[in-house]
């Protein structure tokens, strides 16, 4: 990430450190100093409220402390002056010429890459059918958080856990074997000749309906699960065929959204390499779980409620609130395997997977998958210092149990470093349901949003949604650029559609229920990805017009001195535009610290708005004053670069035109 992407944040940090050092010297108080944005732009660029915190400790008026501090802090590089406002705010005014010159000349260090690894686990779709719209929010949130952390200098590993031995896969296998009478060879043929993830979507819904009408068929599920977990026989072979084919389909779907992974840890290896057995012995040894001899959970190994329910008492540990880790038939529950997996992520299990190369993306990046067979030449995975699990909010309870398992084993530090990156569901607006061919009752048509159910076969497949978005974007592109070749128009439409989808999923806070709407997502006005993309394209067009006139971009560093930049930035409109464009770093830091990618989406929109105002106020190419034209051209290139890079953090590409 270029130096100037972090410029404003570096100035903030320099100011905060200068005040912190002076506070320590004057008052023997050691604490970090916070900075804020002044309530009005006319007050300055950065506000320091430290005097208010000190007033309580020193028992002095904050205004008097502020006056003393502002005099004592002395010269701060890049600061033109400090003013006392209100009852004790210290408002900092930056040296505009120095700030602009530093941005232009690169007078700031690059962000260092952390040595410690952060692991982000996201997507994690059951490999039994096509991905649906709800999976898209998980993957887009997770991928964007990865991009944010990397932009901020973190060393990040991206994991996509594959539950290839679970109930969902078993149900599709049951359907193939019992309802369709298919052998592994038959299924292999279907994989090569059909849209297999769509076929399994329908088959899974059919199997769910069959269970509802034939409860005795649930015994098929039990026997199939045992066969899959044992890893032997035709049933196990069929399960691997199904899950591997669906995983390939899922990865292809996510790649359409610019999402890639580093490693695919699979549940089959957690079982076959005895990860769970190792974790089970640890849990028993540390008395984190106990064997239940009576009641509802008789014959099960359970974790007492007191371990993971806040406020639960020790007396509750033998109630039904205890969480089953191993069932009475000796099969392990999801949460048991998740505890083993979480231990591996931190390097605490004393075991590791083997890895084989699963796939190479078109950009050359490799994704690896776990295997139980020894391999050579694979990278090392796991051993993270922090772990974020991107899982919807309905799984909060199970995530609490996983963390409780770490604590019960004595891994307090790792428990604290385990973060449930939760989010709410995605629904559809009624008009989008209708456009996707979903029949609605009159009552549903009046609702603000409509929940869909993949289990009932009424969900919206991710690829269908993406295809519909591209179709609509292509209609708009064709109406504006009918003369261009169809492949070019489609390429532009794909970037617009993916940008619209990603931005829509990101602009809301994670705890908000989303009602996805085609018209809103693809709008050229308002807070949309299309609007931000349009700003970036417009910036490129301005620079393109210069080339059309036979001109070239000036050598900005040679022609724009600090004094020249200072003169141009005396225009408040240009100064505010430059400030806004230089605050990407602050938006990313806020988003990382709060775990809210929506902050970056919001900043991208504000950046696009700032560029739109700049574009309307200043005719860049037509400017007659040479110095001013040179500055305006530089600011245009800076805006374009910041728009492109901020969109890049959001996983959104800039199309050639709109």
Image (cartoon, grey):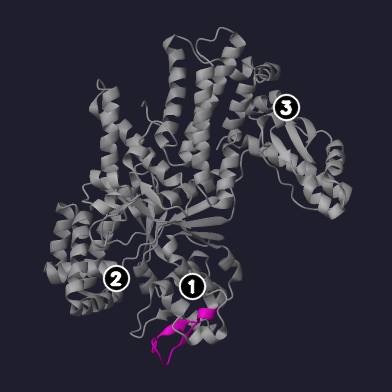
Query: Relative to 83, is 342 on the left or the right?
Result: left
Q: Which residue is mark 3?
A: 95
Whether residues under marks 3 and 1 lie with C-beta atoms below 8 angstroms apart, the answer is no
Query: Is residue 351 something that shows in the picture?
Result: no
Q: Which residue is mark 1?
A: 401
Circle 3: element type: loop
Q: Is residue 419 above or below residue 439?
A: below
Instruction: Count neighbours of disc 3 (C-alpha within 10 A) and say few if under 14, some if 14 to 19, many if 20 or more.
Output: some
Please name whichever residue, 175 or 384, is drawn nearer the observer in this view of the structure.
175
Q: Quadrant of residue 89?
A: top right
Mark 3 or mark 2: name the one nearer the start of the chain. 3
Whether residues under marks 1 and 2 lie with C-beta atoms below 8 angstroms apart, the answer is no
Query: Relative to 367, is 224 on the left or the right?
Result: left
Q: Is residue 110 above or below residue 315?
A: above
Mark 3 or mark 1: name the one nearer the start of the chain. 3
Mark 1 or mark 2: name the one nearer the start of the chain. 2
Q: Residue furthest left?
A: 181
Q: Residue furthest bottom?
A: 293
Q: Residue at x 74, y 39 (%)?
A: 15
Q: Which range of residues does the magenta coloring cover?
A: 289-306
Residue 167's mark? 2
Estimate the spatial distance between the alpha carbons at disc 1 and disc 2, rounded to whole Å.
Answer: 20 Å
Estimate the spatial distance between the alpha carbons at disc 3 and disc 1, rounded to whole Å.
Answer: 53 Å
């Amino acid at each position: 990430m270029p130096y100037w992407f972090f410029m404003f944040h570096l100035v903030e940090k320099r100011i905060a450190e200068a005040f912190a050092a002076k506070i320590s010297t004057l008052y023997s108080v050691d604490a970090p100093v916070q900075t804020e944005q002044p309530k009005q732009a006319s007050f300055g660029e950065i506000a320091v409220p430290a005097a208010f915190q000190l007033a309580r400790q020193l028992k002095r008026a904050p205004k008097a402390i502020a006056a003393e501090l502002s005099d004592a802090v002395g010269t701060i590089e890049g600061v033109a002056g400090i003013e006392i406002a209100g009852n004790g705010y210290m408002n900092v005014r930056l040296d505009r010429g120095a700030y602009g010159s530093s941005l232009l000349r690169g007078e700031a260090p690059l962000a260092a890459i952390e040595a410690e690894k952060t692991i982000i686990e996201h997507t994690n779709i059951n490999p039994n059918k096509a991905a649906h719209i709800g999976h898209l929010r998980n993957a887009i949130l997770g991928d964007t958080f990865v991009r944010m952390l990397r932009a901020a200098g973190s060393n990040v590993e991206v994991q996509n856990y594959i539950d290839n031995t679970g109930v969902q896969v078993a149900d599709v296998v049951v359907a193939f074997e019992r309802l369709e009478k298919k052998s592994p060879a038959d299924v292999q043929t279907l994989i090569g000749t059909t849209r297999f993830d769509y076929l399994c979507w329908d088959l899974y819904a059919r199997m769910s309906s069959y269970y509802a009408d034939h409860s005795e068929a649930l015994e098929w599920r039990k026997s199939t699960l045992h066969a899959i977990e044992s890893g032997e026989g035709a049933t196990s072979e069929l399960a691997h065929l199904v899950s591997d084919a669906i995983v390939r389909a899922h990865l292809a779907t996510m790649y359409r959204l610019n999402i890639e992974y580093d490693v695919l840890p699979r549940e089959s290896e957690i079982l076959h390499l005895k990860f769970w057995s190792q974790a089970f012995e640890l849990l028993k040894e540390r008395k984190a779980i106990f064997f239940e001899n009576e009641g509802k959970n008789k014959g099960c190994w359970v974790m007492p409620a007191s371990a993971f329910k806040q406020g639960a008492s020790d007396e509750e540990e033998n109630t039904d609130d205890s969480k089953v880790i191993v069932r009475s038939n000796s099969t392990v529950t999801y949460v048991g395997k998740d505890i083993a997996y979480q231990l591996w992520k931190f390097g605490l299990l004393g075991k590791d997977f083997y890895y084989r190369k699963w796939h190479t993306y078109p950009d050359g990046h490799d994704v690896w998958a776990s295997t139980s067979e020894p391999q050579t030449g694979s990278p090392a995975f796991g051993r993270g210092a922090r772990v974020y699990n991107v899982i919807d909010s309905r799984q909060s309870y199970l995530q609490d149990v996983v963390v409780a398992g770490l604590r019960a084993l004595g891994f307090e530090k790792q428990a604290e470093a385990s973060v449930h990156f939760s989010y709410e569901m995605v629904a559809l607006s009624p008009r989008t349901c209708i456009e996707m061919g979903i029949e609605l009752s009159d009552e549903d048509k009046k609702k603000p949003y409509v929940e869909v159910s993949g289990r009932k076969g009424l969900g919206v497949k991710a690829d269908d949604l993406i295809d519909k978005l591209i179709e609509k974007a292509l209609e708009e592109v064709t109406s504006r650029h009918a003369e261009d070749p169809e492949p070019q128009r489609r390429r532009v439409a794909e970037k617009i559609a993916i940008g619209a989808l990603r931005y829509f999923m990101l602009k809301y806070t994670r705890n908000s229920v989303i009602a996805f709407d085609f018209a809103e997502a693809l709008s050229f006005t308002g807070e949309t990805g299309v609007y931000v993309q349009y700003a970036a394209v417009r910036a490129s067009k301005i620079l393109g017009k210069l080339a059309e006139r036979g001109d070239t971009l000036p050598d900005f560093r040679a022609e724009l001195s600090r004094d020249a930049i200072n003169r141009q930035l005396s225009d408040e409109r240009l100064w505010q535009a430059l400030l806004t464009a230089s605050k990407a770093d602050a938006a990313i830091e806020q988003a990382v610290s709060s775990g809210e990618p929506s902050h970056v989406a919001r900043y991208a929109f504000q950046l696009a708005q700032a560029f739109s105002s700049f574009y309307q106020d200043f005719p860049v190419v037509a400017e007659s004053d040479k110095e001013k034209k040179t500055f305006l051209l530089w600011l245009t290139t800076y805006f374009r670069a910041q728009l492109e890079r901020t969109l890049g953090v959001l996983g959104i590409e800039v199309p050639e035109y709109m």
